[in-house]
Amino acid sequence: MDPFSKKPFDVQNITALVLQGIGADSGIAPPAGTCQSLPGARGAQSGSVGLLGGGRAGRMVCARAALGPGALWAAAWGVLLLTVPAGAQRGRKKIVHVLEGESGSVVVQTAPGQVVSHRGGTIVLPCRYHYEAAAHGHDGVRLKWTKVVDPLAFTDVFVALGPQHRAFGSYRGRAELQGDGPGDASLVLRNVTLQDYGRYECEVTNELEDDAGMVKLDLEGVVFPYHPRGGRYKLTFAEAQRACAEQDGILASAEQLRAAWRDGLDWCNAGWLRDGSVQYPVSQPREPCGGLGRAGSTGVDGGANGGVRNYGYRHNAEERYDAFCFTSNLPGRVFFLKPLRPVPFAGAARACAARGAAVAKVGQLFAAWKLQLLDRCAAGWLADGSARYPSGGGWAGGARDPAAWTPLRV
């Protein structure tokens, strides 16, 4: 059932969500004594993270972390906060074995499948090459890493020729060669960002021969549907990109949406994806969501058990849909802050700011639910003015108008 279609909740049941160091998103408070959820198991036992305060009074959720100016979140009756632990920016490193290939005198070896990291982590993109260097030596070999941004478009990441190395764009200061002996072209990428997700090409060239291999970098994270407070189907493709960025995410890829569907995501509203297509996942087939398995009603991975419905590539400047966003690891934690009395959106934002935190963003609350196992049957304000809550079985929430609440002093 679509959680945004629930009846308006009583203001006495609203809490505030605060994210320390980051921001949190808000959700709709459930009826007294109940928790509604969005289908989609996270495959782990739910738990409470950063829970402050107790009793029946309202709460706020705040987040503490490195914040940009004006990045504040809050919720009536409660606030979610995110606190950054010491060493939170230190990523973990995963080693992946390589496979051999052959395509000439220069042979490039890259990782099978994909390598997996998370936002803020450190990862090695494996690439080794074999070159009979009796005549020329390895100093004459050119190593180049590029990222595939479109089927026929690449962006430069890193290049090396002998002792001369250079990283490009956002990879400056984060990318370097592993340098584990002759023939090692593996790239070490530090402080991984959401934008680093995708496919990379390792190209090795000598004077006469070259060869290349592909490495796919995947991220641990969560896909979440999003539409602004103004209503559904309001976003062009560019607006969907901005909306995801404002909620601490990026547009999800088609592969990420299919993975989320396999994990149980069920959402009967079409949204933009990173490649410009419009799709939506249906785990439980029903008439309003593409039918009950009749011919032509299913999309990718479709069948009697549902699937990912695909509208194909749409006119990205004229047509309007929702968005499917993706976010990854948080550099801190989301938690609830209990105020002395119920507060409106503005009051929750002030309460979070007074504690060195900010009102959480939607993506941050989703990440806390999926990755930090946050489970709380109490709603709180989020940075976009919506009120939401995370529960063990999924996510519930909706858009509310902050102006509709009577201001209270904090």
Image: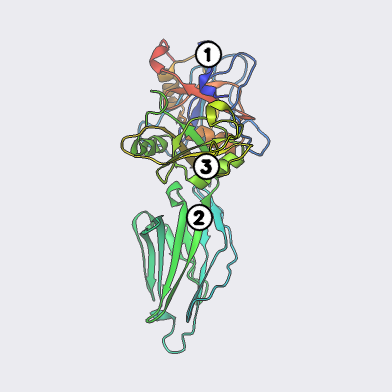
- Residues 20 and 326: in front is 326
Residues tagged 3 and 1 counted as in contact (Cβ below 8 A): no
Q: CA distance from mark 1 to mark 2?
A: 42 Å
Rendered location of residue 80, percent (x, y):
52, 27
- Residues 99 and 356: in front is 99
Check disc 3 and report the residue beneath it: 257
Q: What amino acid is found at the position of numbered circle 1 in the picture? A: Phe
The mark nearer the N terminus, 3 or 1, is: 1
Residues tagged 3 and 2 counted as in contact (Cβ below 8 A): no
- Residues 110 and 350: in front is 110
Rendered location of residue 35, percent (x, y):
62, 21
Q: Secondary structure at mark 3?
A: helix
Q: Is residue 58 above or below residue 120?
A: above
Residue under the point 61% across and 31% down: 284
- Label 2: how many Cα within 10 Å (few below 14, some 14–19, many 20+): some
Rendered location of residue 122, percent (x, y):
51, 55
Check disc 2 and report the residue beneath it: 217
Rendered location of residue 313, percent (x, y):
40, 43
Check disc 1 and report the residue beneath it: 9
Query: In the rendered view of the protein, which quadrant contains the C terminus?
Result: top left
Q: Secondary structure at mark 1?
A: loop
- Quick check: 18 left or right of 318? right
Residues tagged 1 and 2 counted as in contact (Cβ below 8 A): no
